Amino acid sequence: MTQPHPAPHTLPLPPRPEARPGDEGAASPLDTLPVLARAYGDMVLIGRTEQGAPMCLVSDPKLIEFIHVQTGRLFDKGYQNVPINTLLFGNGLVTSEGDFWLRQRRMVQPAFHRERIQAYGAVMVDAARRYVEGVRPGETRDVHSDMMHLTLDIITKTLFDLEMGERAEPFERAMNDMFEADVVLRTALRGGEENPGAFAAFQDATSRIDRFVADIIRERRAQGGEDRGDLLSTLLAAQDDERRGMTDQQLLDEAKNLIMAGHETTANTLTWAWWLLSRHPEAEKRLHEELGRELGGRVPTLADLPRLTYTNRVIQEAMRVIPPVWTVGRRAKTDMELGGFFIPAGTALIMSQWVVHHDPRWYDVPEEFQPERWAGDLEKHNPRYAFFPFGGGPRVCIGENFARMEAPLLLATIASRHAVRVLPEPPVEIEAAITLRPRHGLRATFEPRGPGTA
Ligand code: HEM
């Protein structure tokens, strides 16, 4: 279907819109990208990267599958061209390429084997139970900030076997500062501007995060690196084919990658699930009925997950309607033909979960939150990459199984005890940062629910 093209100039370039909708104002890409895809088709040129390469939005699931599967051979990520990505992720799994990436992936993968992460189910439920116990009935809280705390607690416990305790505060502050500066910086970059103040704040926050993680690695090396059942134990013991382990710098980068990639994504999945449930009382009622029936007031365990079918569908549908990762990008390594068009080497191919998950070719009334749509054979009928919240191919999310455990377990534990009622103010606005997050947080009151309450 697609190959390095022998006579590229015989093919047309993908269409380039005269003017992008919203060019005249600061329209969100969440509004403009679907409009462009529907108007111009599955391949459309949407601008240029910071390095001046053409940027093409690809919305055909078959092409998206091809690009994911051929990553490494015909495509690379090209993320290291963006300096803030390197500051954020170092040379870890998210940004690295080629043989270096493959070696690292092979060393980190065992930490995510199903059996290894099974034990983390109890850590997840335990953290959610403690959270629920700390919520006062009728209290108003920022659910987004709560979910961020909760998933950060869980990733630090499962990664470092560390109860955050008094160490938590400076680390959480550094993480918050980093996320805030990151949003400001990326917005400035999209507008072609620089923001030295935000860059300095970003550098300061990332170096505080580095120091925190480096201290933990040093302590663990000093303790002889024994297996404490956490992810770091596996990383400390990992060896490549030549029986070489990771250097401290590599460990630092990989640990940071797991924290960065693994905590905000799941927190946002849950935040959006609460928001969507709050707007769809009939779905919330079905969720509560299932939890009452299957759990009868006790906290869930991992063994309950296969029976919590509606709970899982709520998470699945929340990731469809508001995918936490809303675009992934690849770079064409050579001139090629793709979807009948000529793609010059260096072109950035943007694939957007937001665009594809809202495509009426794959989903009836795509804007509607309908967890029950996953009950039938939707997945069998749709092309495989009509739903790709975790990406795919060799660079598929390494934490997918972890997240697919964590999100429903937290939802079930919290929803068993509380109905989360989102307040009308401040209005909820979806901000397109690296992930989709609520710009002003998510204010909600917590109404207690007893065992068996529907
Ligand atoms: C709902 C939660 C999550 C979502 C939606 C998500 C989504 C994604 C996506 C789309 C990618 C592929 C990016 C690309 O192809 O360019 C990815 C990669 C990655 N994710 Fe996740 N993720 C989630 C949770 C996690 C968790 C819990 C962890 C770790 C604990 C994690 C660690 C990573 C890492 C390290 C990569 C890079 C893998 C590689 O390139 O080898 N993610 N994630």
Image (spheres, rainbow, N blue to C red):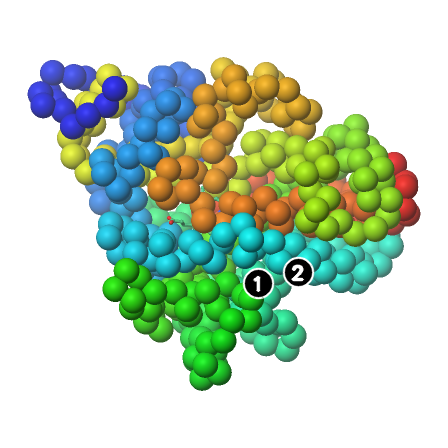
Towards the viewer: 307 or 88: 307
State the residue at coordinates (85%, 40%): 292
Q: CA distance from mark 1 to mark 2?
A: 7 Å
Badge 2 marks a residue whose secondary structure is: helix
Res. 375 image quadrant = top right
State the residue at coordinates (73%, 44%): 304
Q: Which residue is mark 2?
A: 123
Q: Are marks 1 and 2 in contact (CB under 8 Å)?
A: yes
In the rendered view, tell whether residue 86 sits above or below residue 330. below
Amino acid, disc 1: Thr
Towards the viewer: 263 or 242: 242
Amino acid, disc 2: Val
**Label 2 environment density (alpha carbons within 10 Å; few <14, some 14–19, many ≥20):** some
Res. 150 image quadrant = bottom right
In the picture, the disc for residue 158 is 1
**Nearest to N terminus: mark 1 or mark 2:** 2
The reply, left or right, for residue 169 in relation to residue 108 is right
Residue 417, position as x, y percentages in the image: 83, 49
Can you tell me whether the CB of the residue at mark 1 lies under 8 Å from the nearest atom of ligand 1?
yes
Residue 363, position as x, y percentages in the image: 56, 19
